[in-house]
Image (spheres, rainbow, N blue to C red):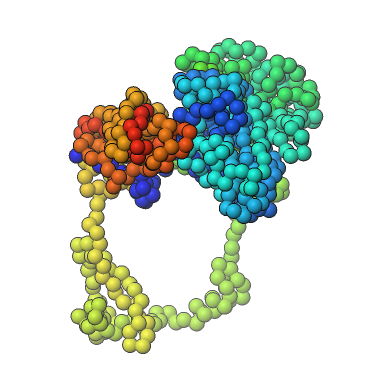
Amino acid sequence: MFFVFRGPYLDKKGLAYVWEKIKNYLKYRNIVPEQSKTYTGVLGTANNWSGATFFFGSIRPTGWYDLWKIKYKIHTYVPGKNAYDMVAEVMISGEQGNMRAYSSMNTVAAYYPAYNHELYRLKSAGYTNGFGHSLGVRFYSAYSPTTAGYERTIEVEILETENCEFTFYDSCLPYASIPGTGSTNYDNYTEMNYVTNGLQETSDSNDVNYQNRIYYSSTTAAAQIYRYQLLLRTRDGQAVPVSSANNTFTTGKTYSSIPFDPFGEIYYWNTTSAPAAGANLANAAMYRQILADLRYAFDLDATDAHKLTARLPVYLTATPQADGTAVLTKPTGSVIGPLTQSLPTSEDGLIYIYLGQAYEDSKPYRLELTLSHPVYWYKNGAVREYSPSVNGHTVNSDVPANAKFTDTTYEEASTTAAGLMSASDKSKLNDIDDGAEANQNAYGKVWAYNTDGNVLYSDTANAKTDTMVLLEGTNVELSSEAMYLGGEYVNALKISANDPAYDTMTQAQANAGTSTDGKLISPKVLNDTITGKVGTNFTETSGSTVSAANNAWTKVQSVTLAAGTYLVKFGVSFASNATGYRSICLTVGSETATLDRYAPTQNAVSGRATDMMDTEVVVLTAQTTVNVHAFHTAGTALNTYPFIKTLKIK
């Protein structure tokens, strides 16, 4: 027996909660994108601009004269070829048909994976006609953009948008296939390379103003700074090196004990120069965002005990001080210094400053240093954002320098002075006699009505001490509700039937999968169960080339899975053919592939292959075969190239 939760139903309340938790767990960082899309098998048709440039989405401003901005992350790679792997964070802004500013941070200074960012700019007429600026990427002619075996995978995450709406194209498009392409709607192209980090503005005339490289003529070294150090800031603005090392040894490093500002900026000293304590750092190579080698600052190298795990967050650890500063502190058991890749699960007295994420498996000591550095600690049973304290009191907002923490004492209220109540209220209370009773027989009669307004029960109080008792029964709830009766509103007793009560499932029961029938599961237990069981990598089952008949479903790949709950990513690449449409679907066991099932459909495009992918959640109670099917109306048999990726989450 099995259950399959299909794509359209992920919007439902329960499955949406599960899906969001799974996505958050698998993210490289703790940033949830507004939307994302992955394109696979992207291959150029010629070694030139028109044949090796692909656009993946449209930026539609809220108004033609509005200043819009979009920030996105793009991961471009060729599976199995490390040199062709790159991640970039990009910000572009503009208004009307102009690009006002552009900035990027790239993890690889090479043209292998990608050459340029591309912006196909809109005209006013194009905006009136309903189109948007097109966003894309270009591959370098010297690095195999058309060679079989070098098909790019492009993963795009839209992190932030302002005054615009972004829409992904179904597939990566050459400029000639962009909706509305041509001089009527579009003006020109703006392209920025993937090698230069930093900020470029319209007035720069293609000269780069390095936004992430800092020149502070007033910055001095708080201690001797050696090559490739991570620098912190003191309260008075001095630069503090994390360690006093001038080598890449994994033992013997001495870490700074100078108090620093945990909310201050963090820099990477990207040079071999070694200024002494007190030296001015003018015209020095300090970077706020860069791919940093941490072997000189921490006890890191490529060995198992001293390496970082790629694509996981990295945190600097320190002990908070009474004055709001912090001092670097190794977490318990650390052999790499005051550094960790996980947040605490219990209160340990440390704060955790987010630095960025570990970059790659081949060099597990490199860090993508980010611009923002939120600070966390474990407090009151959970990981929370860190707030410093003054004399043991938590400071949640800006406090004047002369503020004092004091207790306030109030006098007892009297008829002549206000206190915990006003003088007039006290006077009213004084006018009430001792033992006074007000309207003791509050309910002279009790009536019970049915929904037709007929009296089912009535009773009259004979004395002020009369008591009427109403009892709730099994799955019956009593409550009060206002109703209009006899020309006035009165309080009515409402009797409601409840659903049967269920016990709540414990975490241990959820983990073991036993004693769970008929029990409710809380969001926390659901979250902890999922995040505790989700692995970090999908298991990919690559298929072989399969010929799919015209106008019929063809099973192109299968995989046998043991009992459990799985995320199943599957896809099919159809050979180039301009006729008809393509569709794929997933079946379990002996299910029949039909268009009535949930099956994404995509029209063919002239001159290129059709790539399709989908994701489903599959629950199996016994070992079962999961199958990928392909359908097309090309008019002739087509070669297909399928794949299945599975991730067991329970």
Q: Is residue 65 visible?
A: yes
In percent of width and height, residue 476 lies at: 23, 65
Residue furthest out toward the bottom: 487
Q: Is residue 90 left or right of residue 308?
A: right
Q: Is residue 88 left or right of residue 436?
A: right
Q: Quadrant of the N terminus?
A: top left
Q: Is residue 145 left or right of residue 69?
A: left
Q: Is residue 621 left or right of residue 88?
A: left
Q: Residue at x 50, y 78 (%)?
A: 429
Q: Residue at x 24, y 31 (%)?
A: 625
In percent of width and height, residue 584 lies at: 34, 38
Q: Residue at x 24, y 59 (%)?
A: 499
Depth check, front residue: 590 or 199: 590
Q: Residue at x 46, y 81 (%)?
A: 432
Q: Is residue 320 visible?
A: no
**In the figure, 496 relative to 125: above or below?**
below
In percent of width and height, residue 411 lies at: 59, 65
Q: Quadrant of the C terminus?
A: top left
Residue 421: quadrant of the picture? bottom right
In percent of width and height, residue 563 lies at: 24, 33
Depth check, front residue: 437 or 177: 177
Residue 604: quadrant of the picture? top left
**In the figure, 456 relative to 527: above or below?**
below
